[in-house]
Image (cartoon, rainbow, N blue to C red):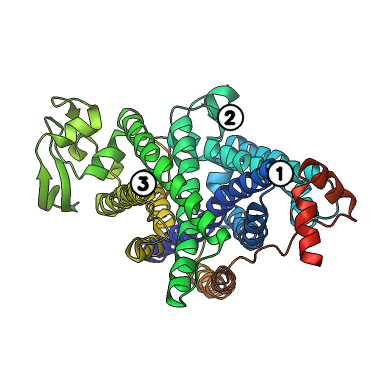
Amino acid sequence: MQNAHDLAFILARFQFAFTVGVHIIFPAFSIGLAAYLAVLEGLWLATGRHVFLDLYRYWIKAFSIVFGMGVVSGLVMAYEFGTNWSVFSKKAGPITGVLLSYEVMTAFFLEAGFLGVMLFGMNKVGRGLHFAATCCVSVGTLISMTWILASNSWMQTPRGYRIDPANGQFLPDDWLAIIFNPSFPFRLVHMGLAAFLSVAFAVGATGAWHLLKARRQGKISSEPVRVMFSMAMWMAAIVAPIQILAGDAHGLNTLKYQPAKLAAMEGDWNSEGRAPELLFGIPNMKTEHTDYAVGVPLLGSLILTHSLDGKVPGMKDFPRDQRPPSPVIFFSFRIMVGLGVLMMLVGLWSLWHRRNSTLFLSPSFHRVALCMAPAGFLALLCGWVTTEVGRQPWTVYGLLRTADSVSPISLSSMVVSMTVFVIVYVLVFGAGLGILVQMLGREPEEGEHDADPSHASDILATRAHPALVDASAAKGA
C-alpha cells in the first residue's frame, strides 16, 4: 500500500509538472506577442507606414491561437489544485487563492473585455479606440503575470502570514508583505524579460525563414519580412544582455533566501570561500559528491557573491530530507544559462551585420536565427524547472512539505488521468501548434488592408495620414 501511495504521489507531481510545462509556453508567448502587437499598431498610427499594419494583421492571427490555448491549458491546472493537491489548497488557499482571484478579477476581465475589439474591431471602431483595446489586452497579460508570480513567489519566500494553530492554515497578516515578498521583484522582471526574449526569437526565426525562402526562389524579400526580422534582432540585442544581468540579481536573491536551492544548482556540497564554478559534473545525492566535475577556480565565488573570497553554501549544510534533487536543477540551470548566453551572442552578431549592412543578406546568420526559434521557450522551461524543483521538498518553502500537500488519491485514478492528459494534450495542443507553424510559414501579405475612405474610422486615419488616401486610390486604379 505504501508503494502504491508513493507512486500515486509521484504521478501527481509529474502530472502537474506536465500541465504547467505545457501551459507556461502559451502565457509567455501571449505576453510578448501582445506587447509586440501594441508596438506595431502604435508605429502604424504614428508613421502611417502600412508595413506595420501588415505585420499587425499577420501576427494577430497567431496571437488568437496562442491566447486560446493558454486559457484552455490554464483551466486544467485550477482543477488539479482541488483534485490532486487539496491539502495544499486548504492550508495555503487563504493566501494563494486570493491572489489568483485577483488575477481573474483584474487581468482576465480586462483581457476578455477588450479581446473581441482587438481581434474583430479594426474596421468597426475608431483607430484610437482599437489601439487602446490592443494596449489593454497587452497590459492585461502583464497584470496576469504579476499576480501569478506574486502567488508563486510567496510560496518560494513566504512573508506576511500567520499559521492557525487549530488547522495549520496560512492566514494573511500583511498583504503588502505577502505580495511584495523578497523574491517577487526579481522573479517578475526575470519572467517578463524571458517572455519578451522568447517572442523576439520566435518572430526573428519566422523572418529568417522567409528571408531564406526568398533567397532560394531568387526573389527579393518583402518589406514586412525585413521589418519583422530587424525588429526581432533589435529586441534580442537589447533584452538578452539585460536578462543576464537580471538573472545575476535573481541569483543573489536566491543565495540569501534559498541557499539550499543555490547549492543544488551549483553542485556544491561543502560550504567554502574562493569556490570554483562547476561547468560540468554529475551530482551524486548518495555519495554527497559531484562526479566528473570540471570547474573554473574562484569563479563560483565571484559570480555568486561578487567577491573572490565570498562564501558559497554547500548541500551538506542542510539535512538530507531538506535537500532538493541536485542532478535535475544542476543541468536545467546550465541549459538555461547556456541558451541565455547564446541568445545574447546572436543579438550581438545581428548588430555586427547591421553595421555592415548585411542583416538581410547573410544566409548563415539567417539559418542560425531560424534554429534559435525555440531557444527562449526552452530557456524559460529550464528556468521554471530550476525554480520549482529547487524549492523541493516544500510547496511553501520551509513550512509545508510537498508530501504533506497531496490529496488522498489512488494509484489507479492517477494512472488513468495521467494517460488521458498526455493523449489529449498531444492531440489538442499538437494540432494547435501545427496550425500555428503552418500559418507562420506563409509570408505576410502587403497592402491588402489599405484604408477605405468610405469607412468612418478610416476617415479619421486618413485625416491624420493623407498618404493613406493615395494608397487606397492607387489600389483602386
Mark 2–mark 3 Cα distance, whole angstroms, equals 57 Å
In the image, is 88 to the left or to the right of 471? left
Could you tell me which quadrant the N terminus lies in?
bottom left
Q: Please rate how many residues cluster around mark 1, counting C-alpha atoms within 10 Å: few if below 14, some from 14 to 19, many from 20.
A: some
Q: Hey, what amino acid is under mark 1?
A: Leu
The numbered mark, 2 or 3, whose residue comes first in the sequence reads 2
> What residue is pinned by disc 3?
355
The numbered mark, 2 or 1, whose residue comes first in the sequence reads 1
- Front-most of 112 and 366? 366
The answer to whether marks 2 and 1 mark residues whose Cβ atoms lie closer than 8 Å is no
Q: Please rate how many residues cluster around mark 3, counting C-alpha atoms within 10 Å: few if below 14, some from 14 to 19, many from 20.
A: few
Q: Hey, what amino acid is under mark 2?
A: Leu
- Identity of the residue drawn at 56% across and 59% down: 223
> What residue is pinned by disc 1?
45
Q: Is residue 144 above or below residue 118?
A: above
Q: Please rate how many residues cluster around mark 2, counting C-alpha atoms within 10 Å: few if below 14, some from 14 to 19, many from 20.
A: some
Mark 1–mark 3 Cα distance, whole angstroms, equals 28 Å
The answer to whether marks 1 and 3 mark residues whose Cβ atoms lie closer than 8 Å is no
- Identity of the residue drawn at 77% across and 54% down: 470
Mark 2–mark 1 Cα distance, whole angstroms, equals 49 Å
Q: Secondary structure at mark 3?
A: helix
Q: Secondary structure at mark 2?
A: strand
Residue 163 in view? no
- Front-most of 387 and 27? 27
Q: Is residue 255 above or below residue 412?
A: above
Nearest to the eye among marks 2 and 3: give it: 3
